[in-house]
Structures are given as structure tokens and as C-alpha cells.
Amino acid sequence: MIKNKLALFGGKKVRNKDFLNPWFFDKKETKAVLSVLKSNELSGFLAFKGKKFFGGKKVLELESAFEKHYKIKHALAIQSATAGLHAAIAACDLEPGDEVICTPYSMIASATAAIMHNAIPIFADIDPINFNICPKSFKKLINKKTKAIIVVHLFGYPAEMNEIMKIAKDNNIYVIEDCAQAPDALYRNKFVGTIGDIGVFSFNQNKTITCGEGGIVLTNNNELAKRLELIRNHGEVVVDKYPVKSISGIIGYNYRMTEIEAAIALEQFKKLKKLNNHRIRLAKYLTQKLKKFGDLFQLPATGCEKCLNDCKSKHVYFVYPFKYNCKVLNLSRDLFAKALQAEGFPVTIGYLRPIYLEPMYQKLKAYGKKGFPFKGPHISKKIQYKKGIAPVCERMHFKELLFTNICRYPLTEKDMDGFVEAIQKIIKNVDEFKK
Ligand SMILES: *Cc1c(COP(=O)(O)O)cnc(C)c1O
């Protein structure tokens, strides 16, 4: 056997070891959970007028920690980011058939949240450098039905918030920030999630900090905060006791967080800075190493390269995204990625397919058999989600984008070196693909 043969063709892998898992739980979480158990109060919520309407001790503590850190008036713990996005759309009190501008390149909930409130997601295209919603594309889609935009800070990099906020303000559009992948990311020195009307964070098992399932919603707007509290906890039964300007949209879900989740999230939140710094350190190291491959890759946008020196933006590298140029090795992205995977390294081909290609959008089937909410008397034009509506997103997904999740705790520079070595090996042996 040839010593350097690619693992894809039966050669020896560059790496045989599994990657250590990313979770960072220690005595602090254990102690926090036990103390909740001992208190006998696993959830402090009651859907009844009074103090308990707002949740238990740990929930309130978690909320204060977020309010303090993000210098925001209101933080509300919630069951998941999906619940948070739905509650956010409901809080904005949209009419059925109102339009919500969404990015097609995200986790599905970043658009489906609108449908959960009978609003219609309209997909803008993305920016080919940072993969976030493109402000120009957003602007083009605005009409009198447009009431909100859900901006996702994808992969940990902030979207172009200045332009987005300006367009939104000029057109009276709510801005909801989906920060599930970008806790503590900065956009021009401002924390994401504090720039728009509402910011939503996730603590699910696969996020930077986790309590299993959970999330938190931030807002500086008192009226929206009141509505969010009511939506979280069966608000329709107490809405007359906690007055809001309009009772519509207060259908009242159970989106409450348990005390155990809150206790874990609180300990995890204390570790966020350390976990992010770990990601940033390894990502910068990897970028430095990958530069030697020249045009083969386009490496992640970092605040400072894109906006020169004044931007003070911060990428938190939820994953490490990079674009692959198939012309350099005359090898397709997918084959390149399969070769890298075979050498023992996690690399994902594209991300999730453009949201509008999912069957619910293609078949226009959400509620019942007649196409509601995409069709009906509340809709004044034909809604359809054709392939090709977001060509940049499709190009990234189907042709150019790759990402790896190795820039994270508890991995080290040595793990990055292995990744680079595997790429080197593929380049050196690229002729094997021709056989
Ligand atoms: C994970 C994720 C969500 C959903 O979070 P949950 O807490 O699992 O509901 C939403 N948006 C983005 C961008 C995500 O990555």
C-alpha cells in the first residue's frame, strides 16, 4: 500500500481519535441542580395573578444575570429559542397574512416562527461573505404587508445591523434578532440581541452554552416585554390584570423554563466568555494556518477585515465556515469534503438546505389542506417559494460552503494542525481522484 494514499481510497487516516465532546459541566452545575432538587420547587411558575406568574427563584436570577450583562431592561427565560421566536412574532401582534422577511440560510425555526403566528415568511438572499441576510435584498422585498424581519447572526458572525436597522426604521418594521449561534458576538461594539426590538438566544444541547433545552429573550421595550410575559404563561387568563394595549396575539402558551434548567443555564452563562475565547483563539489560529492554501479557500469574515479597523465587531465562531474554490484543485467541493471526512475530520458540506426548499414551503401546506396561511382571504397575492429565489444562498449551499466545528472547547491547536495536515495530504495526492 502506498504510504500516503488518501483514506477515502483505503489509505491510513491522518486522525484516528474521536474528538472530545464540547460540553463543559463541572461541580458547579451539579451543585446547582442538587440545590434545586432539595428546594422541592422544580418550576416556580403559576398561570395566576401574583408573584409566581413570573417564575421561580432561579429563573429570576438567570434573567437578572442577562439583564446586567447585556445592559438591557428585560430578559425573559423561555423554553427554547423556537418558543422565543414564536413569542417574539406574537408579541409584535401581526395580522394573519402579514409578511416577515427571513433569511433562507438558518435553522428552520428562524422562519417557521412566522407561520406559527399565521404570518408569511418572505425570503431575502444572503451576503456571500458573511452568509447573513443581505440588507439590499431585504429592502427590495418590503411592501405594505411587511411588518417584521428575523435577522440571524449565523455561525456566530453579526449581520449588517446598521443598514438593517435603518431600513427597518424607515419602514416601521420590527427587528427580531436570532442570536442562537452568536451569544456575546459584537456588532460595532454592541452585543447582538440588544440592537433590534427583541433578541432571542438558545441553550439547547448543541449551542455554546446549554441547559438541555432553553432560551432567553431580551428587549428594551416595556410593552413588548409585558406581552412576552403573557405569551409565555397562559396570558389569556390574566391579561385583564396585567394590562397591555391590545389583548390580541396573547393566546397564551406554556413556554416556561424549569428551575433546574435555569440553574444550569446560570452556571453555563458564567462560562460563556471562556468558551467563546477558546473558540476565537482556535479559529484565529486555524485561519492563520489555512492562509497558506491561497485561493483554495475563502476564510471567515472577521469584523476587522470586512470593516477595516473601526468596526469593533466580534465573530464568536459557533462553527468555522469557509468557502471552497473547486477550480484550484479541479476537484468538486463534495469530493474534497468527503476526502477530509475520511481522514478523520468533521466537515459539513453546505449547511441546512435553503429553508424555502423544505416541503412545507414547496407544497404550501402548514395548517389543513387548503394552504392556510399561504392562501385565503387574508392573502392578496400569490405566495410561492420557487427554487432560485435566493441564488447566493443556493450557490453557497450547493457549491461553495463548508464548515467544521473543531474550533471549540476542549480542543487545542494540535487538533487544528491535524486538520491542516489532512488538507495538505489531499492536495498532495489529488491525482488519486483521476484514477
Ligand atoms: C438552534 C437554533 C434555533 C433554535 O433553538 P432551540 O432552542 O433549539 O429552539 C434557532 N435559530 C438558530 C439560528 C439556531 O441555531
Image (tube, helix red, strand yellow):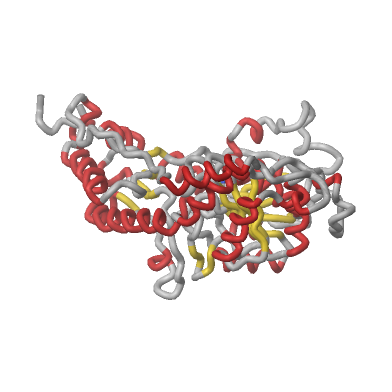
> Split into 4 quadrants, where in the image is the N terminus?
top left
Between 213 and 110, the one nearer to me in the picture: 213
**Residue 18 found in image quarter:** top left
Q: Position of residue 339 (x, y in %)?
A: 27, 34
Give percent across and percent down for residue 194.
60, 64
Q: Determine the residue positioned at 71% across, 48% down.
A: 87
Query: Which quadrant is the C terminus positioned in?
Result: top left
Q: Residue furthest bottom?
A: 310
Residue at x 31%, y 54% (from the top left corner): 282
Does residue 157 sit above or below 342 in this rendering?
below
Q: In this view, does 105 lie to the left or right of 123?
A: left
x%, y% of residue 401? 41, 45
Residue sitting nearer the eye, 361 or 279? 279
Q: Which of 70 and 384 is in front in this view?
A: 70
Q: In this view, does 296 lie to the left or right of 366?
A: left
Q: How many marks?
A: 0
Q: Quadrant of residue 151?
A: bottom right
Q: Is residue 389 visible?
A: no
Image quadrant of ligand 1 equals top right
Pick out the residue farthest to the front. 38
- Vertical placement of residue 415 versus 142, above or below: above
Q: Which residue is drawn at 22% across and 40% down?
A: 422
Residue at the left extreme, as displayed: 2
Residue nearest the viewer, comparing 311 with 219? 219
The reply, left or right, for residue 28 in relation to residue 194 is: left
Q: Against 149, is 39 above or below?
A: above
**Whether residue 373 is visible:** yes
The image shows residue 265 at horizontal and vertical percentages of 53, 49
